Structure formats: C-alpha cells, structure tokens
Amino acid sequence: MKNAIYFDHAATTPVNPLVIQAMTEVLTQNFGNPSSIHQFGRKAHKLLAEARKEVTNSLQVKDSEIIFTSGGTESNNAAIIGMALKHKDKGRHLLTTAIEHPSVLMTMKYLKEQFGFEVTYLSVDKAGNLSVKAFKQALRKDTILVSVMAVNNETGNLLPIQEIGEILRNHKAIFHTDIVQAIGLLEINPEKLGIDLLSASAHKLNGPKGVGFLYKSANLPFMPFFHGGEQEGRFRAGTENLASIVGLKKAIEILNQDERKQRFKKYQILQDLLFRKLDEAKVKYHLNGDLNNKLPNILNLHLENVASNLTLMKLDLKGFAISIGSACTAGNVSDSYVLAAMYGKDHPVLRESIRISFGEGNTKEQVEKLANELIALSQKTNKEEK
Ligand SMILES: Cc1ncc(COP(=O)(O)O)c(C=O)c1O
C-alpha cells in the first residue's frame, strides 16, 4: 500500500487530513446529541447548523432545503421513491437514462415492479452523450419525475442538465439530478438550473464515507423515507451522524476556496500528459466518452486487444489502482452497462476498457509511470497477437 499509486478517485478518495482533524474534534469533544436541550446538545446543534450553512452557501439555497443523509445511494433512493410515491396521483411515468448509477436504476426498477410505475431509460450515443431532442420526445404529459445525472461515473461525460432544467420549467415533472461525480469540480446552483432535487456524497470529495446530502427545493411535497424522530426537518428520522457531517462540511469548505478551478486545471494537464505519452508510443487506444464534453478527472480508455480484467490485475501487482466498470458494484467484474449503452451488448470494447480517475494527490510523475505500464502492456499483447 505504501508505494501504491491510486488512480481510482471516482470510486472513492482519501480523506483530507483537515477533515480527519475536524471529525476527531467532534468525536472526542462534542459527543452531544443535536436534539438534546442541554449544553452538550446545544453545542452539537450549533455544529450541525454550521455544517448545513456551508452546504447551503455553496449551492446558494436555503437551510431548510438540505437533508443530511448517509450518502449518494440514500439520497437517490429517498429522492426518487419519496417523490414518485407522493406524486403518483398526478401520473405514473418516470424518465431517466440507461447510464445512471445503480442506486437510481435499481430504485426505478423497484418502483416499476412494486408500484407499477412506467419507466423510460434513455440511451446515449457512441460518445456517451444524451440527446436533448430524444429527451424532449420521451417526456410525456404523465411524466412526474425526471432523474438525470450531472456527470457519469464511468466516462466523466457531462449530461445536459441545464437544457433539461430549462425544458422542465414548463412541465409539471420534478427534476432530480445526481451530482455525486460533479460536485468536486463544478459549482452547481440548483435554482438557476431548475433542479428540484439533488443528491451528493462526501467520499468523492476527500470527505468521509457514509455521509451526504439531499437538496429538496422548498415547498416540494415529499414522502419521507425514514420514519421516527423529527430530525432534518422531519424528512429523515435518526440522530445525525455529526462527526461525518462536520467532515463533509470541511471537505466542501476546502473545495470552495478556489480549489475546484485549480483541480480542474491540474486534471486537464494530467489527462493531456497521459494521452501524449500513449500517442508517442503509438498505443492503439481510444477514449470512451467525449473529450469535448467531459470532466478531465475521469478517463475511460479502450486499449485494443488488451483484456481489461488482466490489465486491472497486472497493474494492481505493479502497485497501480485503476478500475473497470462501476466500482460501486465492487467485486463484480461483469460488463459495464454504461459502455453497453454506448456500443451495444457484447461489443469487444466492453472487455478491453479501463477507468483511470485522478485525484488531489496525483502527480505528473505518477501519470508517466502509469503511461509506461500501459504502453508495456499494450506492446506485449500486440506482439503476442502477431
Ligand atoms: C454517480 C454516483 N451516484 C451515486 C453514488 C453512490 O454514492 P454513495 O457511495 O455515497 O452511496 C456513486 C458512487 O460511486 C456515484 O458515482
């Protein structure tokens, strides 16, 4: 682990030492329950309120619009199930894409199977892009909920959430977006974008795992997912995970200090460097995704004739951590459904593609080392082919 180089930040990120410090302080000194009336409770409540303020400032929304959750999966489940059940009398159609995270896709499947909702999964083109025209055509009078992610976790491609928000301003459907992979590099203002619900998670931002938030626009009727106490404006029962929420606050605070722009530039440089090295060595590869419509921290590469599962294992033995497919279904090495949506099922690209995702700690030297390994792997396999 010591000398291993981590290129799997789309799966999760190392926790920033300042985040650990802030969390340790809470765990050691502020164990109170934010709902208690006494001074321990009041102190905890103050920390909770400060954390909420940090999130609301970064999104430019109201305090009452943020619900702390256990992360992206819970936020997606709560948003989609909560809205679909609350608004089921206004229509039964749900609209999403085929490349959403499983926490959206499986939730849609559940609603279809258990409650009889009709779900449309929009596909994407070969570059992984969603057509706005196709979206408009799929939108129906009885569509009550749209869920389209901001950035895809396997390709880094941006989805047209701004255009969708515009279209939905004149439609009754509620707009939910998953910004788990976007929030680290993009500033997002839900009101400006016409977003009603938004899901985020801390562990992709150098924060802790198991904490995130759901933004729910004020006055939007919603069926709470958890029942019990009156925490989180009665929308999410259960004593808040205060240490993790304070960790999330710290992670967002760090990002807000111009850090996003700097990271964006840095990842562009690392991305260009990797491409240049592979081009110079005449490696047969191509990018799965759209270079002109993606974030620079996620690179999904098709390495011709190089089996991705072997690449993953060989790189792991050499001390590099990368991934294939979606890491949220960890241990599962079945074909990527995102690449299947782009190229079709059983396409060779599905078994010859890897995902490299950069993070704060990565350096040019590390990228050069990775490029050299990829070049060696590609040359070896292509020689064996001949
Ligand atoms: C786009 C996207 N949404 C949701 C999630 C789930 O978030 P969490 O791990 O916090 O449950 C992930 C995790 O990889 C993700 O990439």
Image (cartoon, rainbow, N blue to C red):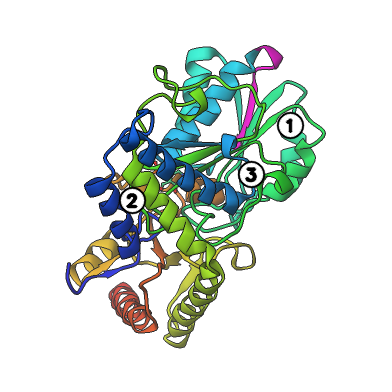
Q: CA distance from mark 1 to mark 3?
A: 27 Å
Q: CA distance from mark 3 to mark 2?
A: 23 Å
Indicate the quadrant containing the C terminus: top left, top right, bottom left or bottom right.
bottom left
Classify mark 2: residues with Cα within 10 Å, few (<14), some (14-19) or many (20+).
many
Residue 202, percent across and down?
41, 50
Mark 2 — residue? Answer: 208
Q: Nearer the viewer, residue 28 or 262?
A: 28
Count of numbered badges drawn on the protein: 3
Residue 327, percent across and down?
35, 50
**Label disc, if present, on residue 61 of the rendered structure:** 3
Identity of the residue drawn at 37% across and 74% down:
362
Residue 247, percent across and down?
37, 52
Quadrant field for ligand 1: top left
> Where are the magenta residues, as a range?
89-96
Amino acid marked by disc 3: Val
Identity of the residue drawn at 39% across and 82% down:
364
| 286 is within the stretch colored magenta | no
Question: Which numbered disc, 3 or 2, marks the residue that appears first in the sequence?
Answer: 3
Mark 1 — residue? Answer: 139
Amino acid marked by disc 2: Pro
Asked if the residue under mark 3 is in contact with the one under mark 1, i.e. CB atoms within 8 Å, the reply is no
